[in-house]
Amino acid sequence: MEHPTSSDTLTFRVTHKIFLVGLVLKGLNAAFELVVGSLCLVVPFETLKAWVGGGSRWLEVFIPAGWATKLDGLVVSLSPAAVAFVAWYFLSHGVVKAFVIACLAWGQRWAYPLGIAVFVGFGVYQTWEYFRAGGAFYLVLDALDLALIVLTVLEWRHATR
């Protein structure tokens, strides 16, 4: 059995810290999804519709010209069924991510392959959505997932030594 050198230990400490930062970022994403999903369930439909409409006005400062019109069209077409889907989508994703992240943070060995599989699954889905509907945010999420996959593999290798 090979003994790690001090440079291996330093490399692990650095990658471990980056791994933890990645888990925190993914955890914030999961928390956001849980909050949005929960709000979709408990806030009355008309109130949600007003919030989305007000948010599109605020976003006009930050988004390209013409997108505000698209957002207004989205608000008009918003339905209770769409809100129910958003609630299910965000809550299911948030619960899965939160569970995997908590298990990885606790260092559960079985969680490493589970985390890799979940992050690959989310990455495949996000890539499909990017090519289907566009949206650079999917690419940002893919980059975070890819980095987290690599870091999880490194953590798993270190945990099994």
Image (cartoon, rainbow, N blue to C red):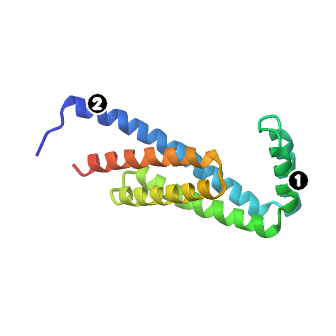
What residue is disc 2 on?
A: 10
N-terminal of the pair, mark 1 or mark 2, is 2
The amino acid beneath tag 2 is: Leu
In the picture, measured across the screen, residue 50 lies left or right of residue 11, that is right
Q: Which is nearer the eye, 41 or 53? A: 53
In the picture, measured across the screen, residue 68 lies left or right of residue 10, that is right
Question: Residue lying furthest bottom in this view?
Answer: 81
Q: Give the residue displayed 40% in from the left and 61% down from the top.
A: 114
* Secondary element at tag 2: helix
What residue is disc 1 on?
A: 50
Q: What's the distance in space between the residues labelled 1 and 2, CA to CA?
A: 52 Å
Name the spot of residue 32 as percent of width and height, x first.
65, 50
Name the spot of residue 113 as percent of width and height, x first.
36, 59
Q: Which is nearer the eye, 67 or 26? A: 67
Name the spot of residue 35 as percent of width and height, x first.
68, 54
Q: Give the residue displayed 70% in from the left and 63% down from the top.
A: 87
Q: Give the residue displayed 65% in from the left and 59% down from the top.
A: 90
Q: Say if 138 sits above or below 128 in the image.
A: above
Asked whether the beta carbons under mark 1 and mark 2 sit within 8 Å of each other, the answer is no
Name the spot of residue 104 as percent of width and height, x first.
41, 52
Q: Which numbered marker is on residue 146?
A: none
* Secondary element at tag 1: helix
The amino acid beneath tag 1 is: Ala
Q: Say if 153 sits above or below 94 in the image.
A: above
In the picture, measured across the screen, residue 27 lies left or right of residue 78, that is left
In the picture, measured across the screen, residue 72 lies left or right of residue 158, that is right
